[in-house]
Image (cartoon, helix red, strand yellow):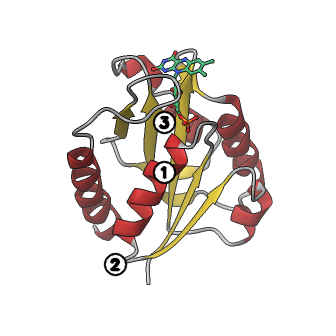
Amino acid sequence: MTKIWIVYNTKHGNCGKWCEEVETKLQEKYEVKINSVKEITPNDVANDPPDMLIVGARIVVGSPDKKIKGFVKKLGGLLKEPIPKAAILYTHGSPWNETFNKMEAILKENNVVDDILPEILEIKMEGIKGPAEPDQDYKVSKFIDNVSYFVER
Ligand SMILES: Cc1cc2nc3c(=O)[nH]c(=O)nc-3n(C[C@H](O)[C@H](O)[C@H](O)COP(=O)(O)O)c2cc1C
């Protein structure tokens, strides 16, 4: 069975909540693990690499936050070979801006993954502490379809 590992960082709980939403939907078809970067180390992932990594990042000052970036960079240095596939989820407070999407380059530059789903999931917050704006759920359904197609092709 295809193994997917979701790793995220959250401060106010929103990024974690949306990653859990994705996990619940993917559990129907795949073996899914989910952890905050506060619970595991990059070594844990490197020692049991999944078929697909999903990274959940909060945007802070126009960029994925430092903890998730640090985790991913360290992971790249520990893996024997890149994880085959990855997808990215962001939570953000300002209107979405393509320049926020720096995780894709970080995953590639650090040899963490071979192939990245081009369609990201971005969830817009109402304010800094959330919650998400209404009507963000449809984005999750679309993301799940994209992930399923990508992981099975
Ligand atoms: C110090 C700080 C800086 C932030 N900078 C940005 C930003 O530049 N762009 C943006 O869209 N959201 C920004 N935000 C909003 C965060 O993206 C939002 O709080 C976060 O995604 C919520 O996730 P969490 O509940 O998991 O912590 C900022 C939040 C904080 C606290």
The amino acid type found where label 1 is placed reads Lys
The residue at 36%/48% (across/down) is 117
Mark 3 vs 2, N-terminal side: 2
The amino acid type found where label 2 is placed reads Lys
25 displayed left or right of 92:
left
Q: Residue 88's x, y, as percent?
A: 44, 44
Tell me if residue 86 can be seen.
no
Query: Which numbered circle lies on residue 116?
Result: none
Q: Residue 63's x, y, as percent?
A: 55, 22
Whether residue 5 is situated above or below residue 78 in the rendered picture: below
Q: Residue 101's x, y, as percent?
A: 45, 28
Q: Choose top left, top right, bottom left or bottom right for residue 149.
A: bottom left
The residue at 36%/36% (across/down) is 122
The residue at 47%/59% (across/down) is 20
Whether residue 102 is situated above or below residue 43 in the rendered picture: above
Q: Nearer the viewer, residue 52 or 30?
A: 30
Q: Is mark 1 within 8 Å of ligand 1?
A: yes
For label 2, the SS is loop
76 displayed left or right of 27:
right
Mark 1 vs 3, N-terminal side: 1
Marks 1 and 3, how far apart in space?
Answer: 22 Å
Ligand 1 located in image quadrant: top right
For label 1, the SS is helix
Q: Which residue is mark 1?
A: 17
Q: Choose top left, top right, bottom left or bottom right for residue 121.
A: top left
Q: Which residue is mark 3?
A: 104
Please report contact status of discs 1 and 3: CB closer than 8 Å, yes or no.
Answer: no
141 displayed left or right of 18:
left
Q: Which residue is mark 2?
A: 29
